Image: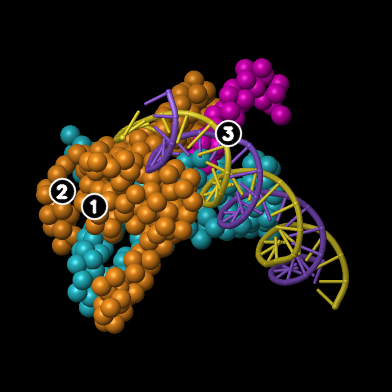
Chain colours: A orange, B cyan, C yellow, D purple
Amino acid sequence: MEKQANPANSAEAVQLAAARDEFVTQWGAIGNAWGINRTMAQIHALLIITPSALTTDEVMEELKISRGNAHTNLRELVGWGLVRSVVRKGERKEYFEAEKDVWKMFCIIVRERKRREIRPAIHVLKDCIERVDDLKSAEAKSFATQTKALCDFMEMADGVLSKVVRSEQSSIVPWALKFLK
Amino acid sequence: MEKQANPANSAEAVQLAAARDEFVTQWGAIGNAWGINRTMAQIHALLIITPSALTTDEVMEELKISRGNAHTNLRELVGWGLVRSVVRKGERKEYFEAEKDVWKMFCIIVRERKRREIRPAIHVLKDCIERVDDLKSAEAKSFATQTKALCDFMEMADGVLSKVVRSEQSSIVPWALKFLK
DNA sequence: GCGAACTTTCACTAAATACTGAAAATACGA
DNA sequence: TCGTATTTTCAGTATTTAGTGAAAGTTCGC
């Protein structure tokens, strides 16, 4: 390695590696706090900061995880649309690369969370409301009022998010910056 | 119980109880998907749909959970500000009631998540950026660019959320509804 | 300052979740 | 069609997280 030959470069490489590790570890912890598998978040972090696409083996090596674990979480990331697999001509190995555009990442995550969690939650609420629709007791009315309020709010939030992710970054970001002033 | 005396009321009570249970269970599952302890979310759900304040013992009974569990999660909810404890004059028992206004609930959750997860994440990113600031390699530049983009985005999101939760529901909701058109 | 009502803590256990590694399946070139 | 490179699966295990319940602590009326 050229880098090891030069003490300054070697020190810099160590410094960069440390920062990268820190980022991967912390991103894993953050994902975890939001209900995302720690390893999945770490792989995502690793792919975000790696310019080139990586193989399963490289991911295993970098994060010191098993093949099964790397495989499952890479598939999960592909399922989210946050990572795509690329095949290099003449090679049988599969390479993985992350979507690096932050706005696109955000849109993907919002869309998926809407689909996986917000929509189902709205359906549950609607179902609860329907179940007590014909009841007349004060308790039933109170229950219906509360669930209805929640449902309306979530539908509104869902709608706003849909509109936001449908718009172009180029129109939203300037708006947001202006909004902040 | 009066309700058991009248078959129609009894049937209605069962129907309502089923809907309430469904709501509590599902809200627990939803909370879970977003990184919140299932029981905490269930207690929150129970308090949201219960008009009166409940004691620890009532929560234990309703959800069939231990005193320790009920206690810990009630405290956690109070810590978030989603539930407040109320004392009735002449009684030593502590009663708990949830904030029922959906907009206020939303603001509390956003504020807490910002404080507990978004801000720390931004600090981590800034730290990573700083660590590689003086490095000159292409890899370091690439890492810096990517983390900077993430950081900028999160700061913008943080700012927008701050502004949203600082505003009045009466000004945001009509705006959102108009935005949806 | 005693004792009952109530709250808090925490060592232990249970349950849920994540990870491993090796075997099976698949894909592909020769 | 065979052999090998690669991917996929999954039973078993490890780790993490949540929950229990009883004991200790607190508060307050008397």
Query: Magenta includes B14?
Result: yes
Label 3 environment density (alpha carbons within 10 Å; few <14, some 14–19, many ≥20): some
- Position of residue A116 measured from the top left corner of the image (x, y, whole percent): 39, 36
Main SS of residues in magenta: helix
> What residue is at 70 percent from the left and 23 percent from the top?
B4
Whether labels 1 and 3 share one chain: no
Which residue is disc 3 drawn over?
B21
- Position of residue A38 measured from the top left corner of the image (x, y, whole percent): 45, 54
Residue A122 vertical placement versus A20 (above, below)? above
Please say if the residues under marks 1 and 3 sit with CB atoms less than 8 Å apart.
no
The part of the chain drawn in magenta is B1-28
Residue A154 vertical placement versus A171 (above, below)? above
Which residue is disc 1 drawn over?
A100
Q: Quadrant of residue A158?
A: top left
> What residue is at 61 percent from the left and 57 percent from the top?
B72
The amino acid beneath tag 2 is Gln
Label 3 vs label 2: CA separation? 42 Å
Q: What is the secondary structure assignment of the residue under circle 3? A: helix
Given residues B25 and A130, the one toward you in this image is B25
The chain under label 1 reads A
Determine which of the numbered discs, if any, sits on residue A169 in the image. Answer: 2
> What residue is at 27 percent from the left and 51 percent from the top?
A53
